[in-house]
Image: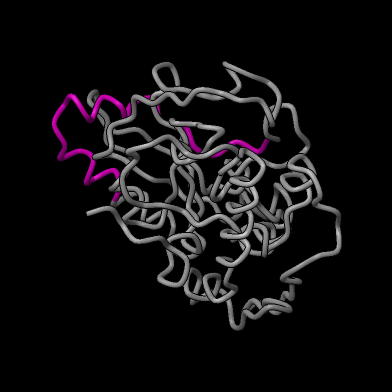
């Protein structure tokens, strides 16, 4: 039964991938996107699919291409049930894509960073975020909206941490924090799957305390939330408008 269910999930997500989501998500940065390649306005051309092996989950997450990046539809609705086994929409990433947009190396990325004023309960905090595609302005707007929430929700937006050029724990893949497009909130009070298990294919129980009021504000501005992953990272938000584009997003729950 489990194998049959997993096969259905794999079939469903493989039918979901749509290169147009990339052009819809980054209209000012991407000139063309089809099932063969995407062309950025800066002249960079990237393949939509690569020939690297993705037979196993570990190969899939380590060798993702753009088609894989769009395979799993992001649900910006509610979370009535925990994400299914190995369902991580947005966690499978093609690193050359982000390097082409935000900077090919640390020096190039840091040249694109801007200062964002983030409101906290104790005053404003300065954060570094990319200004590419106006993402810094989006984060500013998010902070201003969160500042209007009740204190019981706002407290979960404390301890904000953004840019840090580093790899993801126990991998050689660059973190999205390396590109200046990710923010972590309340790291001491939120949940991370590796505190429960170290294996990517382990069966883990879902946990979350991040208020959905904060999640919805981020999603409205093109950010996805790590709490919608089977490998949950409930402090984590990253700018991924391709997964919230009209051609990609799943319908919201009523």
Viewer-proximal residue among 194 and 203 = 203
Task: Indicate the position of residue 46 as horizontal and vertical percent values.
Answer: 74, 71
Viewer-proximal residue among 174 and 35 = 35
**Which residue is located at x 49 percent, y 37 percent?**
162
Instruction: Check the image and report above or below for 213 versus 44.
Output: above
Task: Indicate the position of residue 188 as horizontal and vertical percent values.
Answer: 43, 16
Viewer-proximal residue among 220 and 56 = 56
Along the horizontal axis of the image, is 9 left or right of 190?
Answer: right
Quarter of the view holding residue 148: top left
Instruction: Check the image and report above or below for 148 versus 13.
Output: above
**Which residue is located at x 74 percent, y 48 percent?**
60
**Which residue is located at x 44 percent, y 30 percent?**
235
Residue 146 included in the magenta stretch of the image: yes
**Which residue is located at x 73 percent, y 79 percent?**
36
Task: Indicate the position of residue 90 as horizontal and vertical percent values.
Answer: 55, 50
Instruction: Check the image and report above or below for 8 versus 132.
Output: above
Residue 155 included in the magenta stretch of the image: yes
Quadrant where the C terminus is found in the figure: bottom left
- For the magenta stretch, what is the residue range? 142-166
Along the horizontal axis of the image, is 54 left or right of 83?
Answer: right
Quadrant where the N terminus is found in the figure: top right
Task: Indicate the position of residue 10 as horizontal and vertical percent values.
Answer: 63, 54
């Amino acid at each position: 039964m489990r194998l049959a269910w997993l096969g259905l999930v794999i079939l469903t997500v493989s039918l979901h991938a749509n290169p147009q989501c990339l052009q819809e998500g980054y209209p000012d940065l991407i000139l063309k996107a089809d099932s063969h390649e995407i062309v950025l306005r800066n002249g960079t051309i990237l393949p939509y699919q690569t020939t690297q092996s993705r037979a196993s989950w570990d190969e899939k997450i380590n060798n993702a291409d753009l088609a894989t990046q769009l395979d799993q539809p992001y649900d910006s609705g509610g979370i009535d049930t925990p994400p299914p086994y190995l369902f991580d929409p947005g966690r499978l990433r093609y690193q050359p894509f982000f390097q082409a947009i935000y900077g090919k190396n640390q020096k190039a990325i840091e040249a694109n960073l801007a200062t964002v004023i983030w409101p906290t309960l104790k005053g404003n905090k300065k954060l570094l975020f990319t200004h590419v595609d106006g993402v810094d302005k989006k984060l500013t707007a998010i902070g201003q909206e969160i500042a209007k929430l009740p204190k019981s929700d706002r407290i979960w937006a404390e301890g904000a941490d953004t840019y840090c050029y580093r790899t993801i724990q126990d991998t050689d893949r660059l973190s999205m924090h390396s590109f200046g497009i990710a923010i972590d909130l309340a790291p001491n009070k939120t949940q991370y799957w590796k505190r429960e298990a170290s294996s990517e294919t382990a069966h883990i129980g879902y946990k979350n305390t991040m208020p959905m009021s904060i999640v919805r504000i981020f999603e409205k501005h093109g950010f996805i939330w790590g709490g919608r992953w089977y490998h949950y990272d409930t402090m984590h938000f990253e700018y991924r408008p391709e997964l919230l584009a009209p051609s990609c997003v799943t319908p919201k729950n009523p």
